[in-house]
Image: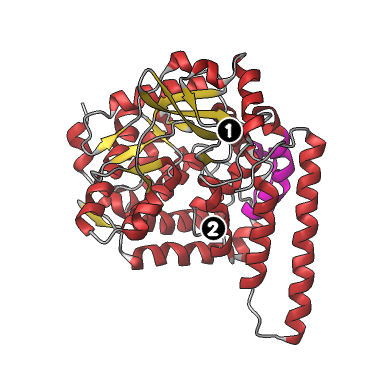
């Protein structure tokens, strides 16, 4: 794979890169509509493929939060067409890495030493590259290590990157009005946290210790003394990325075993720790030779405050869903309904969220759930498509719900998609046996 000797770090330089990408996308639309005049039956598939490729090509060399947003969007297969999901998914663990000379220079800048002065051996070429950093293999005192190094300029460009993508996000997600700022601040806050590698090490150590009794689940050991704000040293973990494993696995029992560990890991964090690994994509999980699950990245951990936790999980209970008064109380608690809403808005959003929650919380309302159920995921997909075409919804203020929905919903839909890829059947209450 081609390596990078330079990453654009300045606001103007990064904006220029996005403008170039915008021109390419515009050209794709001109070509599409010209061809459609000749072939009226032409679908948007080719246009989506061209746009996805051009957008990804523009973002992958920029790295940072712009690419991270693409990664986040790729996790929800119901928002974007398949061409975008397929292309943006590459940002999870397969983007052009920094060149070996730039890695040495970056290491010296961060730590005041070159990597060969810190480790016994250090591979100059990366073995994995993602949106915020890349991973190298190293050894020290007989231990096989993974060393993650952050791309230069990533932390400093977060605010300016989000300012650039903000107009597109407002249009895509119908974020009207002044209240939309709270969502962007939430994303900005989490992205800034992800660039603090000392925080990631602490989170990784704490969650690994708390979840150590969950079977078939492994974590790398972190080495704070060999880590810094921009570098992380941890044990090297052998295994396949979860997406690679699911692509060839034919053993349903193995998939169920891994799926159960994944479910228990997430539900235990949510209900016991009141915080959760909020980046559940295949690049953050490995499967080892014993078919154990390995969690390898704790940069994005979402804290869940009580004022959100209680109504969020109570609203999915049948006694709440089936009681109009109690359901509406939780809707106000979760900021879906507001005191200044008209009667039309109250009725519309109550109905919309009741439909959505009745479907999406099904796994929580049963003793077991089969995530290979295609009908369940088709219902979710159809519902998402219906909402995207709902003209009434687009006319109303789309700023609905607490800011905490952003990462919690992302977490659960990401978890659902991983379990669906596994075709796993899980005991939804099993996690409780590990709780204090």
Q: Is residue 305 above or below residue 323?
A: above
Q: Which mark is residue 85?
A: 2
**Part of the protein shown in magenta:** 160-181
Q: Secondary structure at mark 2?
A: helix
Q: Which quarter of the figure is the C terminus placed in?
A: top left
Q: Quadrant of residue 268?
A: top left
Q: Is residue 165 above or below residue 223?
A: below
Q: Can residue 426 be seen?
A: no
What residue is at 23 percent from the left and 39 percent from the top? 216
Q: Is residue 407 above or below residue 210?
A: below
- Horizontal side, residue 254 vs residue 51: left or right: left
Cα distance in 3D space between marks 1 and 2: 21 Å
The colour scheme used here is secondary structure
For marks 1 and 2, the one nearer the N-term is 2
Task: Read off the residue under disc 1.
Answer: 191
Q: Residues within 10 Å of mark 2 (few under 14, many from 20)?
A: many
């Amino acid at each position: 794979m081609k390596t990078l000797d330079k990453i654009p770090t300045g606001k103007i330089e990064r904006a220029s890169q996005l403008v170039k990408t915008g021109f390419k996308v515009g050209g794709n639309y001109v070509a599409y509509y010209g061809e459609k005049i000749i072939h009226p039956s032409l679908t948007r598939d080719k246009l989506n493929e061209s746009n996805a490729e051009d957008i990804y090509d523009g973002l992958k060399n920029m790295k940072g939060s712009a690419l991270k947003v693409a990664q986040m969007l790729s996790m929800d297969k119901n928002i974007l067409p398949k061409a975008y999901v397929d292309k943006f998914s590459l940002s999870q663990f397969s983007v052009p890495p920094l060149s070996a000379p730039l890695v040495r220079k970056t290491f010296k800048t961060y730590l005041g030493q070159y990597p060969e002065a810190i480790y016994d051996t250090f591979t100059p070429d990366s073995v994995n590259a993602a949106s915020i950093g890349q991973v190298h293999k190293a050894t020290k005192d007989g231990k096989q290590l993974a060393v993650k190094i952050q791309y230069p300029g990533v932390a400093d460009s977060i605010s300016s990157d989000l300012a650039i993508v903000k107009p597109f996000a407002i249009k895509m997600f119908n974020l009207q009005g002044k209240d939309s700022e709270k969502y962007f601040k939430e994303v900005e806050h989490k992205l800034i946290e992800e660039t603090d590698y000392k925080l990631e090490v602490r989170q990784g150590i704490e969650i690994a210790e708390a979840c150590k009794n969950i079977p078939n689940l492994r974590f790398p050991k972190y080495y704070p003394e060999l880590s810094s704000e921009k570098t992380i040293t941890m044990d090297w973990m052998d295994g396949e990325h979860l997406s690679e494993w699911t692509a060839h696995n034919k053993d349903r029992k193995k998939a169920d075993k891994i799926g159960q560990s994944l479910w228990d890991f997430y539900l235990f964090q949510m209900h016991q720790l009141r915080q959760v690994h909020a980046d559940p994509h295949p690049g953050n999980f490995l499967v080892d030779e014993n078919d154990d699950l390995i969690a390898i990245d704790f940069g994005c951990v979402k804290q869940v405050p009580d004022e959100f936790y209680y109504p969020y999980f109570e609203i999915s209970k049948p006694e709440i869903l089936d009681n109009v008064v109690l359901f509406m109380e939780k809707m106000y608690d979760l900021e879906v309904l507001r005191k200044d809403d008209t009667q039309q808005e109250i009725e519309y959003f109550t109905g919309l969220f009741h439909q959505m929650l009745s479907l999406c919380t099904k796994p929580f309302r049963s003793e077991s759930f089969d995530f290979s159920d295609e009908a369940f995921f088709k219902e979710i997909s159809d519902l998402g498509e219906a909402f995207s075409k709902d003209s009434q919804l687009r006319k109303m203020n789309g700023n609905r719900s607490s800011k905490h929905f952003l990462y919690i919903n992302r977490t659960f839909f990401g978890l659902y998609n991983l379990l669906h890829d596994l075709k796993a059947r899980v005991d939804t209450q099993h996690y409780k046996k590990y709780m204090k």
